[in-house]
Each structure stands twice: as structure tokens, then as C-alpha cells.
């Protein structure tokens, strides 16, 4: 009986690789609640989502390229470029409703174009993704610095006030998150995600199975560019200003979140839900380190060590499940 239960658990993890990260998330919520009871109130949890929504969306963007065994180190550069572009656009043309809407459209176009560039150099020119996207990251960051050499240009009041506003007693970020989850739900039900995972399992076998591997990988980068742009919108709403270096630290965090969520950088196994959970794990670890009173000079060390331990636990469980 015990063996049957173990087999069922392992099969469940194979089908849903984000389960270990979900368990870690629940443990962290309980630990945060133990050290700071107010941290598990509705308001605090909404604040956590608001703070990390941009990183959650960036992890979603990263997931769609990891599914096909690629990686995008330029997502931070895309965020910076979209951020300064839309802020500069609003600053130049004013902060009216139509200008804000046009700036959002501009941001989406820039994100998709960045994804197209990455898809071209990686999937069509066959350059190594890790090297090619590192190079395009420098290019995108350079463009961002050209558009806005110095940080601090304020975003339109209409833009950031809308982001922080409550509608019918519900914060705007909850509506934004609900819309994104709905969009992700339909994407995950589509054949496209299954194709990405099939390509990630092996380019040759996918090609022999009749899949257009190159086209699929390019589409993955396009989707990554789109979600990176949406992530930039959230970050702009959160900071209410433009900063050409704002995305610098977010790239590797998005990769860590994907792995924390049960994704494999070798491709063929990744979960958007798991990646979003991975971001919340990072956020809750940061909160817990603060709540337990860790001295400031030790906080980065403890945070990094805790994330590493969470990564090892999740990877170990998933490896056991796949064995």
C-alpha cells in the first residue's frame, strides 16, 4: 500500500512538476505568518503580488523559451528598453488617455520586435541562445541608455495612479493578474505550448515528427518579448518612472524562478504556474530573512543560500520522480 502511494505521488510530480515548489511556497507562507502574523493578511499578500508581479510576468516570458530548450538573457534589457520608451513617449506627448494607450501599444511592438530579433539570431542563424541573447541584451540596454541616459523621468500620473487604484474595492493589480492568468490558461490549452515542449524534448525527433522547429522557436521568443513588455508595464506602474538599468537584476531571477518552479533548462519540461510560484518563493524568502531579524550585512548571503536550498530540494524531488 505504501509503495502504491509512493508511485502515485511520483506520477503526480511527473505530470505536475511544480508540486514541490507549491509545497515550498506553503511552508514559506506559514513561516512568514509565524514570525510576522500580519504578513499573511489579504492586504499583505496583495502587496506581495503587486511588488513581484513584474518579475512573475518576466518568469512567464522566460518559461516559453525554456520550454523549447532555449534561454533568453536579454529579458532584462527588453524591460529597460520598453520602460524608457513608454515613459519618454508619455513625457513628450503628454499624459492623456490616448497617449497612454498608444504608449502601451508602442511597448508591445518593441517587446515583440526584440523577441523577433532574438528568434532570428538563435533559431534562424543558429547561434547559441545563451551567447546570442547576452549580446542582444547589451544592444537593448544600449538603446535604453540612448533614449534615456539618466534615470528619473516620471511616468504619466494617469498611468501610475491607475496601477495603484482600487476598483470596486479590488486593487487594479488583481485585475491585471486575473487577465494574465486567463491569457496563460488559453495559451496552455493551445497546441502551440505542446509543440514548444515537443521541440524542447529534442529538435531532431520533433523535426522527424513533422514539426517546424525553427518557426516554433521563433514564436517562443516572440511570446517571450510580448510578456517581457507587459512585465515592463507593471514595473513602470510600480516605480512611476523611467530607468534605463531597471531590468538589469531581473534576468537571472527570472531564470531562477523557472527552475524553482520545476522547469528544466534542458527543455521539454516547464510550467508557467510553477515559474510564477518560483517568483513568490523568492519574494517570501526575502521577507522571511527580514522578519527573523537577520543583520543587514548577512541578508544577501542568507537569501542566496535559502534560494539555493529551495532549488536543490525541488530539483532532487523532480529527478527522483523522473527516475
Image (cartoon, rainbow, N blue to C red):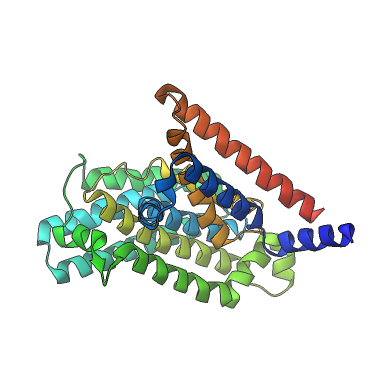
Is residue 123 among the parts visible in the rendering? Answer: no
Q: Is residue 47 left or right of residue 156?
A: right
Name the residue rendered at 47%, 56% in the picture: 118
Expressed as whole percent of the image width and height from the top left, the position of residue 19 reads: 65, 57
Is residue 306 among the parts visible in the rendering? Answer: yes
Expressed as whole percent of the image width and height from the top left, the position of residue 94 reads: 10, 61
Q: Which of 24 and 57 is in front in this view?
A: 24
Name the residue rendered at 51%, 49% in the picture: 29
Q: Which of 187 and 84 is in front in this view?
A: 187
In the displayed structure, would residue 123 be above or below residue 255? below
Q: In this view, does 41 lie to the left or right of 70?
A: left
Name the residue rendered at 57%, 68% in the picture: 216
Q: Nearer the viewer, residue 76 or 96?
A: 96
- Dividing the picture into quarters, in which one does residue 5 lie? bottom right
How many numbered markers are drawn? 0
Name the residue rendered at 59%, 70% in the picture: 193
Expressed as whole percent of the image width and height from the top left, the position of residue 58 reads: 44, 54
Quadrant containing the N terminus in the rendered view = bottom right
Expressed as whole percent of the image width and height from the top left, the position of residue 261 reads: 59, 53
In the displayed structure, would residue 96 be above or below residue 265? below
Amino acid at each position: 500500500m505504501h509503495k502504491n502511494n509512493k508511485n502515485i505521488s511520483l506520477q503526480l510530480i511527473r505530470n505536475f512538476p511544480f508540486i514541490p515548489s507549491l509545497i515550498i511556497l506553503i511552508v514559506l507562507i506559514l513561516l512568514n505568518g509565524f514570525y510576522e502574523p500580519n504578513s499573511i493578511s489579504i492586504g499583505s499578500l496583495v502587496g506581495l503580488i503587486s511588488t513581484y508581479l513584474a518579475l512573475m510576468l518576466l518568469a512567464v516570458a522566460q518559461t516559453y523559451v525554456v520550454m523549447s530548450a532555449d534561454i533568453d538573457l536579454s529579458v532584462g534589457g527588453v524591460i529597460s528598453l520598453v520602460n524608457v520608451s513608454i515613459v519618454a513617449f508619455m513625457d513628450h506627448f503628454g499624459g492623456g488617455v490616448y497617449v497612454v494607450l498608444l504608449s502601451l501599444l508602442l511597448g508591445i511592438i518593441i517587446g515583440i520586435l526584440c523577441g523577433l530579433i532574438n528568434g532570428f539570431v538563435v533559431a534562424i542563424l543558429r547561434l547559441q541562445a545563451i551567447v546570442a541573447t547576452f549580446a542582444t541584451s547589451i544592444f537593448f540596454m544600449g538603446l535604453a541608455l540612448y533614449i534615456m541616459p539618466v534615470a528619473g523621468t516620471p511616468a504619466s500620473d494617469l498611468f501610475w495612479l491607475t496601477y495603484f487604484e482600487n476598483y470596486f474595492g479590488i486593487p487594479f493589480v488583481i485585475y491585471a493578474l486575473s487577465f494574465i492568468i486567463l491569457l496563460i490558461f488559453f495559451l496552455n490549452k493551445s497546441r502551440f505550448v505542446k509543440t514548444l515542449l515537443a521541440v524542447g524534448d529534442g529538435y531532431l525527433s520533433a523535426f522527424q515528427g513533422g514539426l517546424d522547429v525553427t518557426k516554433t522557436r521563433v514564436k517562443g521568443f516572440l511570446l517571450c518579448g510580448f510578456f517581457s513588455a507587459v512585465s515592463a508595464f507593471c514595473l513602470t506602474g510600480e516605480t512611476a518612472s523611467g530607468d534605463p538599468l531597471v531590468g538589469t537584476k531581473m534576468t537571472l531571477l527570472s531564470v531562477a524562478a523557472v527552475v524553482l518552479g520545476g522547469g528544466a533548462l534542458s527543455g521539454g519540461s516547464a510550467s508557467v504556474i510553477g515559474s510564477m510560484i518560483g517568483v513568490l518563493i523568492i519574494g517570501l524568502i526575502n521577507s522571511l530573512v527580514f522578519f527573523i531579524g537577520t543583520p543587514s550585512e548577512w541578508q544577501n548571503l542568507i537569501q542566496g543560500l535559502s534560494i539555493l536550498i529551495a532549488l536543490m530540494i525541488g530539483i532532487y524531488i523532480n529527478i527522483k520522480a523522473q527516475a
